[in-house]
Image: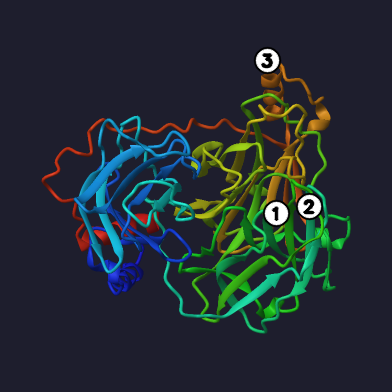
Amino acid sequence: MHSLLPFLYLFSAWTKGAWAADPTMPFMEYLDEKHMVCLMWGFDNLKGNITFKLEVNTTGWVGFGFSPNGGMKGADMVIGGVGPDGSYFTDRHALGKFEPLVDQQQSYTLLSMNEKDGQTIMSFRRSIQSCDKEDFLITAQPIKLIYAYGLTDEIKNHRDNRGTKEINLLEYMPRTTSTNLNFLSATMDNITVPAYRTYYYCKYMKLNLTTKHHIYMIEPVIEHIDIVHRVLLHRCPSFVTEEDDRPCYMGDMGDTCFGVVAAWAVGGGVFELPENVGIPIGGADSGTIYRLEIHYNNPRKEAGRTDSSGLRLHYTAQLRQHDAGIMITGVSPWTSLAYNIPPKTPEFHTYGVCNTTLFSELLNPVPELQFFAVMLHTHLAGRKIRVVHYRNGTQTGFLALDEDYDFGLQQTVNLGHITTVKQGDEIAVECTYDTSDRTNVSIMGLGSTDEMCLAFLYYYPAINITACVSHPNTGMSENSTTSDQNTIAEQESLMKNLPQIQYAFDDKHNYSVNAHGTVRDMMETTVTCETSNAASGLSTSCKMKPAGIILVLLYIAIM
């Protein structure tokens, strides 16, 4: 039985905000770090309408939309404002980096448009399941939202007044705002980045907190966004005791630090955990060594650049209900294996499988795990990532999904719902690569032009399992380097059907292994829509009553 009290409390907290005056739109996010662009939204059911209110600190034109990859090409958007002759509003689509075209079918309905106190406030709605070919299909998955605005009503180049943020609109996981200003800094100390295309550097440090605290927000501190590709903070085993800094992956004890505490990758922003979970730090492990690992991607091989990037860990002494952990899943990134991705192919798949039966060899009992957020990761050739959940050998659904993966937009996103993983369940990660522009084989490895296939999964309650990964037993086959498409298909099938060598690691660097894992079939990611036009039935307002809001919260909480 689920108590209503947490949801009633959350609802009452929402109503205290200035934006909660409109009960039809209970959800709110700032789309930019400077809080210049505020989006509110709400819906009554998954087959009905979704209503938006966009508030932007400008008196010029404003734009908002959905993008398959965070850019302009293929985006569905609306542009509006209040000009000298009154308000204007159009439904548009973009074919590239130039002014979006007006849709033949106007599927968005303007509800209100006004300027007040230097802001433009635009309210509008559309059908969730629009089938207009020029409209983006809204699903219960994280969606890349884009925004832009001008300083005048002349719709033209928006310079730096644009951005993107990935949000799950239909299964939004709300968070509370903390007034706590305490944080720990885990940053490099003015290191020199050499003139290498790929460079990994590690700093080993203590984060001294004598009592247990919870990290509730992870903030990137990125000094050089053009070369800092990924930042990881690992918790090290107890036998790693020295504070130091040096290049990573040199075959020393530092390479046993697998337990991810915090993660960031290029394109990501601040990540705040849900209000009921926190990443534990301090207390019994106050003497633990942590490894800050930064992957520098320096394609121009510039010499002499110095960097002090890292992470800021916001923490609180008010412990939350659950300890959260981060588990690495996918294709093992630490083993040297012949897993060739052939050149000149538009679509090649790789697979990594986690079998949770391995956990019982490292801890007992194994609790049910609740997964709530993810950061997906490949390198430059990655185009799609799917994370699949199986129970009793049958797929239950997609734990995470990005079929328009963008190397430059690797955000940690709340899944919006909770997926329960029980002992014996399996998690498979499928990555799709496009090597059409490559003339040489790509391998699985650490280099920027090598490839990876990983999902950093956030869950609770935290256990001592740090990674659950696999790779095909390529010793039983020969990898092809051909670009012949028939041979490529055969190679992909072979790699998928080879036995998977599966590993689970704990925080002491112990591991369990199964050499006979399998990659199970995955269902197609199909979506359905309705042909009704969002412009129909415009005489009635899409209202969500307070009771309906609470039902939505309950639905989200028990998913």
The number of discs equals 3
What's the mark number on residue 302? 2
What's the mark number on residue 486? 3
Which amino acid, mark 2?
A: Glu
For image coordinates 46% across by 76% down, the residue present is 178
User: Callout 1: few (<14), some (14-19), or many (20+) C-alpha neighbours within 10 Å?
Assistant: many
Q: Is residue 60 visible?
A: yes
Image coordinates for residue 171, horizontal then vertical, percent = 39, 52
Spatial CA distance of label 3 from label 1 is: 38 Å
User: Callout 3: few (<14), some (14-19), or many (20+) C-alpha neighbours within 10 Å?
Assistant: few
Image coordinates for residue 243, horizontal then vertical, percent = 82, 73
Q: Regarding mark 3 in the picture, which secondary structure is present there?
A: helix
Q: Regarding mark 1 in the picture, which secondary structure is present there?
A: loop
**Is there a contact, CB below 8 Å, between mark 2 and mark 1?**
yes
The residue to which callout 1 is attached is 227
User: Between residues 296 and 312, which one lies in front from this camera angle?
Assistant: 296
Spatial CA distance of label 2 from label 1 is: 10 Å
Q: Is residue 509 visible?
A: no
Which amino acid, mark 1?
A: Ile
Label 3 vs 1, first from the N-terminus: 1
Which amino acid, mark 3?
A: Asn
Q: Nearer the viewer, mark 2 or mark 1?
A: 2
For image coordinates 82% across by 50% down, the residue present is 196
User: Between residues 395 and 337, which one lies in front from this camera angle?
Assistant: 337
Quarter of the image where one finds residue 362: bottom right
For image coordinates 73% across by 27% down, the residue present is 342
Q: Nearer the viewer, mark 3 or mark 1?
A: 1
Spatial CA distance of label 3 from label 2 is: 41 Å
Is 145 displayed left or right of 499 in the figure?
A: left
Label 3 vs 2, first from the N-terminus: 2
